Amino acid sequence: MIIKLDMANAFDRVDHHFLSAVLKKFGISINFINIILGCISNPWTAPLINGRPRRYFKSTRGQRQGCPLSSFLYIIMEKTLSAQMEKLRKQKLITGIGIERGTKEINHSLFADDTLLIGGASCIMARRFKKVLNAFLDASGGLLNNKKCKIYTWNVPDQIKQRISNILDIPIQWNWI
């Protein structure tokens, strides 16, 4: 199965405490982390409504849309999800798919706020994906837009597909084969 995840307002939901902890874990100096947080923390924002700016207000989390740092910081933060998925792949707890014999299996793919989780279509695998994903979302402040998330399967009985869908609270999109 392939689980396509859509993060709801991904950049707006970034928890700055989690981001700071991740940057520390990557070995970034505290002085540089403070500079980054100074650039993104508590910015004043004036939303445009019908093309006209409204009152300024102070934002308490997230990252400004269009800020050159936003994508980079989000990717660094999301690296924690990738590291956990890789750890579980090495432990053979979440399998993936092999592209070619002798190559490492792939159990996830991340690009900015687009995420694919890849693994065997079973209830056990769905529960493991759910556990890792919930831990990441809880820590990072993230939220899934379940209406835009999809599960793609092939050669899976309808009963198993429905159980997987219920575990993940994500609809099955369609069968590939």
Image (cartoon, grey):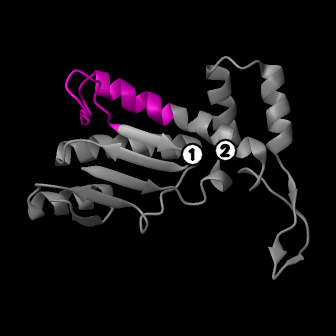
Left or right relative to 21: residue 106: left
* Residue at 22% over, 21% down: 102
Q: What residue type is labelled 1?
A: Ala
Q: Specify the quadrant that holds the C terminus.
A: bottom left
Is 5 colored magenta in this rendering?
A: no
* Residue at 30% over, 66% down: 171
In the image, which disc is placed on residue 71?
A: 2
Q: How crowded is mark 2: few (under 14 residues within 10 Å), some or many (20 or more)?
A: some
Instruction: State the residue position of label 1.
Output: 112
- Placement of 111 over or under 145, stated as above or below: above
Q: What's the magenta region?
A: 80-107
Q: How many labels does the image show?
A: 2
Left or right relative to 145: residue 170: left
Extreme residue toward the front, this view: 100
Q: How crowded is mark 1: few (under 14 residues within 10 Å), some or many (20 or more)?
A: some
* Helix, strand or loop status at disc 2: helix
* Residue at 25% over, 41% down: 119
Quadrant position of residue 173: bottom left
Q: What residue type is labelled 2?
A: Ser
Q: Earlier in the sequence, mark 2 or mark 1?
A: 2
Question: Between 88 and 110, which is closer to the camera in this rendering?
Answer: 110
* Helix, strand or loop status at disc 1: loop
In percent of width and height, residue 16 lies at: 70, 41
Q: Main secondary structure of the magenta part?
A: loop
Answer yes or no: do the residues labelled 2 and 1 have beta carbons within 8 Å?
Answer: yes
